Amino acid sequence: MKAIEVIRPGEIHIINRENYGKPAADEVIIKMKAAGICGSDIHIYNGHSAFAVYPNIMGHELAGEIVEVGESVTHLQKGDKAVVNNVLSCGTCYACSIGRENVCREVKVLGVHVEGGYKEFLKIRGKNVYKIPNTVPWEHAALIEPYSIAAQVIDRGGLSENDHVLICGAGPLGLITLQAVKRLNVKVAAVDIVESRLEKAKELGADLVINTKKDPLVETVMDFTNQEGASFIVESTGNIAVLEICVSDLAAQAGRIVVLGFPKEKAKISPFDIMRRELDIIGSRLNNNKFPIAIEWMEKGEVDPEKIISHRYSFDQAKEAMDLINEKPNEVIKVVLLF
């Protein structure tokens, strides 16, 4: 079978690998049909990932057809259309014991810590695979994983219909989260410095877009929220200054700040700001069994992945796709590779 391998940062090749043998009793083999390119894949390609080793086969936004099924796997059968949960957990540590496998002490992520799905076939435990309706196109199915991250954000932050939402960062994940929160018909403002991303946020239903190169952030957010501040904030920029201002100036009384971005710097945050407004500052990582929710959204048409996909490439054009993202990031939202 063919696979996309990053030999070393910046060098990517299509290689030939031996096909798998029969799956173990608890495994399935999937013939890949479509795969999304995530920011973490670009970090690996560019050599900026803290976790990746080389050579590396990336890929964790995956959709394909079941072609082999282990004897103990009962929820899947040959020919099923399926997607892959990229979170691999130990099942025995404290986090796993309380049902939070996404922050397992030994968590591994497909395509980051272990070999991923940018290859013609993938062998994986059946428990990590979900059947999807035949009505969902392959390219859309590949994006169920990032929509599961949005479902995790909503769950962690406890989104309600009364919230004023502020999404900091209108990149792919910010825009996907925007689509997900607008299902509840809440008021949403999106913040970025790239005008094309903000235009896409408008198209996806943002009630207000804020370009911080032009607009005063604090005053604009306060006007938008009737001087209350945002009650539900998603920080996905990875800019430490943005997180700091969310805590100091943008969050409402009893507000929640869900942290997705992870800059290397340490934040300068006043405990007084947290205490006096009783803020919740909440981490959100990967997804915790949120695939069924994201699949349901897509099946019911509550989200529209087509508006997120900006480019499609054949999987053997992976280098061209990665280079496009590096060279013209403002023109790209989500790239899908077709197998």
Image (cartoon, grey):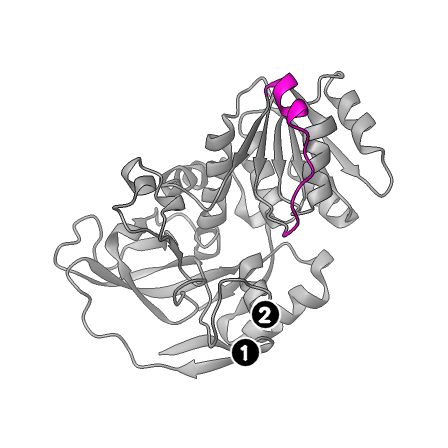
Foreground: 24 or 63?
24
- How busy is the neighbourhood of tag 2: few (under 14 within 10 Å), some, or many (20 plus)? some
Q: Residue at x 38, y 43 (%)?
A: 291
> Is residue 274 part of the magenta span, yes or no?
yes
Q: Residue 64 occupies which quadrant of the picture?
A: bottom left
- Residue 243, position as x, y percentages in the image: 67, 38
Foreground: 179 or 283?
283
Which mark identifies residue 136? none
Relative height, residue 232 to residue 200 (above, below):
above
Q: Are marks 1 and 2 in contact (CB under 8 Å)?
A: yes
Which mark identifies residue 8? 1
Tell me: 29 left or right of 238: left
Q: Look at mark 2 in the image and give the residue it sits on.
A: 47
Q: Tag 2's secondary structure? A: loop
Foreground: 232 or 241?
241
What is the span of residues highlighted in magenta in the rendered image? Answer: 264-278
Q: Residue at x 48, y 56 (%)?
A: 139
Q: Earlier in the sequence, mark 1 or mark 2?
A: 1
The N terminus is located in which quarter? Answer: bottom left
